[in-house]
Amino acid sequence: MAADHTGTALPARTPQDESDVEPSQLRRAGLKITMPRLKILEILAGSQPRHMSAEDVYRRLIDANEDIGLATVYRVLTQFEGAGLVTRHHFEGGTAVFELNEGTHHDHIVCIDCGRVEEFTDDGIEDRQRAIAVRLGFDITDHSLTLHGRCVRENCPHRAKK
């Protein structure tokens, strides 16, 4: 289960979260309400896994019989990133993935074999980062921590290939 920056557990995302998407989110971000933007926002809000590439979003649109091109998906995701609605990450093999910015800080650990991404928070890590910043004379305005390793799942689909 994910947690916010204070360590408080966050509820698991469900497909019902998709209905929480409102056009006002686009307006508040300074974007016009268009059908492609709404559809892409809905997909990101209801996504499992939580981190999706532009191609993943595009495949979901195709599966839903939506006539929205891949170039539009890239353009909208870039607009969402600029407006602060999504965060872009480069976890696996340089492919950019996006997650809806829900306003809570978390870090990531990524399996270098299968690409599975787990989110976590740790108050000790956060405290240590703040202490280092103070010691070096910095005021942290933003940060991102991504750990890379190998998952130990016995059923990892990529382990057999190694």
Image (spheres, helix red, strand yellow):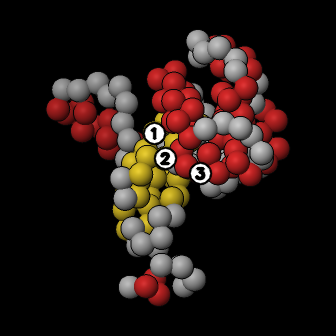
Looking at the picture, tell me which residue is in the foreground, 22 or 57. Answer: 57
In the displayed structure, does residue 91 sit left or right of residue 133?
right
Instruction: Work out whether residue 29 can be spotted.
Output: yes
- Image location of residue 81, percent across then percent down: 49, 29
Q: Which residue is mark 3?
A: 56
Cβ atoms at labels 2 and 1 below 8 Å apart: yes
Q: Is residue 25 above or below residue 153?
A: above
- Image location of residue 148, percent across then percent down: 36, 62
Looking at the picture, tell me which residue is in the foreground, 143 or 111. Answer: 111
Q: Report, in whole angstroms, how far the alpha carbon at label 3 lies from the one at label 1.
A: 14 Å
The image quarter in which residue 30 lies: top right
Cβ atoms at labels 2 and 3 below 8 Å apart: yes
Q: Which residue is mark 2?
A: 97
| Quadrant that contains the C terminus | bottom left
In the displayed structure, does residue 161 sit left or right of residue 17?
left
Q: How dense is the environment of label 3, judged by Cα within 10 Å: few (below 14), some, or many (20 and up)? A: some
Q: Amino acid at mark 2?
A: Val
Instruction: Work out whether residue 121 can be spotted.
Output: no
Label located before the other in sequence (2 or 3) = 3
Q: Amino acid at mark 1?
A: Arg
Q: Is residue 157 above or below residue 29?
A: below
Q: Report, in whole angstroms, how far the alpha carbon at label 2 lies from the one at label 3.
A: 9 Å
